[in-house]
Image (cartoon, helix red, strand yellow):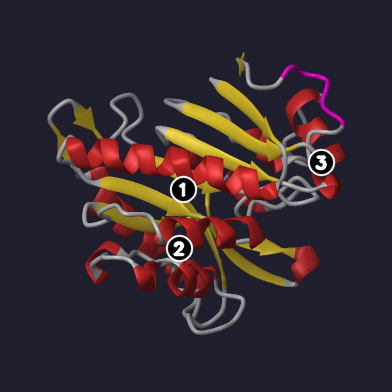
Amino acid sequence: MLHCVTLENPEAVVHEAAKRILHLVATAQEAKRDFHFVLSGGTTPKRLYRILADANISWDHVHFFWGDERCVHLDHTDSNYKMAHDTFLSKINVSASHVHRLQGEIAPPLSAHNYEKTIQAIVGLSHFVGHDKQCPYTGIPSFDLVLLGMGADGHTASLFPETEALKAKTWVVANFVPKLSGYRLTLTPILLNQAANIFFLVTGSDKAKILQAVLEGPKNTDLLPSQLIHGETGNVTWIIDKAASACLGMIHDKQRT
């Protein structure tokens, strides 16, 4: 199921996303179960994380993961981990054992392999009464929430156009991106699509044409990787601002399948 919610500006987008995230986190806490949350890099999540850090809520039951990472040391300014740590994780009550980062400083294939093992151990083997965190149909672990953005080229996470990761059968890959002349670590569609909830945050007029192509244009996943994320078991919600929605013809704030 796909939903699209259009708001006035980027600030409204991050506040709406924060409200939805906090509701999901609180619901899991009330049910006395762990919550598995995949974080994103980027400018919009950076503002979102600052809002979440100020929320009066317990994060003790939340396990944090990343959708992608640059192949850099954890203290590097390009590190998605560092951004989330500095703006959010370092300011809340979360155990270090609940923070599961991609190791950008080691060999990319080894890092991808290690992360698959971590996901299997932490998410895939977590079962709760009335809440089976492993998809019964596929055996693929299901995150509670995946946070994503979309680049002006239609990429999401580090699933770039015409790269090998788009067709990967594993959960995590070291994806060589020719236009970047290097590797990125990324979760793959086969894993991302099993999440119970997926939030895309998209803002700015520079995303308007590509967003229209992704949501309303013909299917071309090789060139528009964001089209690969459709949610096999849960809901996909696009939370966008008016500038990003400028080229869309669909009616917003409505359910769309």
Left or right, 149 with respect to 251, comes to: left
| Circle 1: element type | loop
| Circle 2: element type | helix
Q: Quadrant of residue 243?
A: top right
Instruction: Residue under label 3, please give it.
Output: 243
The answer to whether residue 33 of the structure is visible from this angle is yes
Q: Nearer the viewer, mark 1 or mark 3?
A: 3
Residue 184's spot in the image, x, y percent?
A: 61, 65
Residue 233's spot in the image, x, y percent?
A: 42, 25
Task: Residue type at mark 3: give it.
Answer: Ala
Dots 1, 3 in contact, CB < 8 A: no
Q: Quadrant of residue 9?
A: top right
Task: Residue type at mark 1: give it.
Answer: Thr
Question: Which image quadrant: the C terminus?
Answer: top right
Residue at screen point 63% across, 29% down: 5
The local crowd at label 3, few if under 14, some if 14 to 19, many if 20 or more residues have their Cα within 10 Å, is some
Label annotation for residue 112: 2
The local crowd at label 1, few if under 14, some if 14 to 19, many if 20 or more residues have their Cα within 10 Å, is some
Towards the viewer: 95 or 161: 95
Towards the viewer: 167 or 227: 227
Q: Tell me how far mark 3 sits from mark 2, CA to CA.
A: 36 Å
| Residue span colored magenta | 247-251
Question: Would you place residue 105 above or below residue 5 in this image?
Answer: below
Residue at screen point 69% across, 48% down: 10
Dots 3, 2 in contact, CB < 8 A: no
Check residue 248 for magenta coloring.
yes
Towards the viewer: 172 or 99: 99
Dots 1, 2 in contact, CB < 8 A: yes
* Mark closest to the chain's N terminus, 1 or 3: 1
